[in-house]
Image: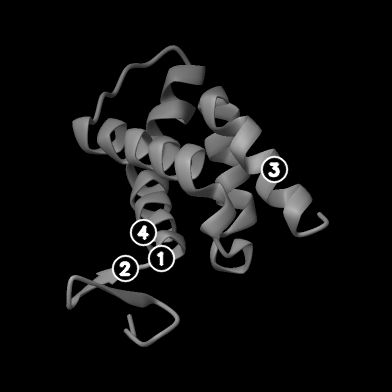
Amino acid sequence: RRLDGTTVTLLAGLPVLTISEFVRAKLKAWVMYGAVHLRLSARGLKLRSRRADRDAEDIVFALSRYWNRVDINRIPEQDMHEFVVGHKAVAPAWAELRRKYGL
């Protein structure tokens, strides 16, 4: 991934991912692990991933607190829709973000 002014911000002089890029990266990781879990659980099978659970918690926290700082154009909509189906706690923040962008 290319790091530039649109993906990185400085915090105390140290480069860190923007909220949008953080959510995007966590969502991508969740899709790889979490989506498999949701599909298997729908079939009655169990697969737990602490990593996917942690990624989900991070996404919910970041969007719930900082939804107004997220660039919706950086978030894959289909992946986020799938995430919201499995994590209702983030639905209000996602709805507000979509409303902000007129979607």
Classify 10 Å Cα crowding around label 2: few (below 14), some (14-19), many (20 and above): some
Tell me which numbered mark, 3 or 4, is placed earlier along the sequence. Answer: 4
Residue 92: name its quadrant.
Answer: top right
Q: Name the residue under label 4.
A: 22
Q: Are marks 2 and 3 in contact (CB under 8 Å)?
A: no
Classify 10 Å Cα crowding around label 4: few (below 14), some (14-19), many (20 and above): some
Residue that sits furthest to the front in the current view? 12
Tell me which numbered mark, 4 or 2, is placed earlier along the sequence. Answer: 2
Mark in the foreground, 3 or 1: 3
Q: Which colour scheme appears in the figure?
A: one colour
Q: Do the residues labelled 4 and 2 touch (CB within 8 Å)?
A: yes
Classify 10 Å Cα crowding around label 3: few (below 14), some (14-19), many (20 and above): some
Q: Name the residue under label 3.
A: 96
Relative horizontal placement of residue 30, taking residue 91 as reference (left or right): left
Query: Label 3, label 4: how many angstroms apart (C-alpha)?
Result: 19 Å
Secondary structure category for the residue under label 3: helix
Q: Name the residue under label 1.
A: 21
Which numbered circle lies on residue 17?
A: 2
Q: Are marks 4 and 1 in contact (CB under 8 Å)?
A: yes
Q: Do the residues labelled 2 and 1 touch (CB within 8 Å)?
A: yes
Image x and y of residue 67, in percent:
55, 48
Q: What residue is shown at x 42% (from left), y 50% (from top)?
A: 27
Residue type marked 1: Glu
Secondary structure category for the residue under label 1: helix
Residue that sits furthest to the top in the current view? 44
Q: What residue is shown at x 51% (from left), y 19% (from top)?
A: 42
Residue type marked 4: Phe
Residue 7: name its quadrant.
Answer: bottom left
Residue type marked 3: Glu
Query: Label 4, label 1: how many angstroms apart (C-alpha)?
Result: 4 Å
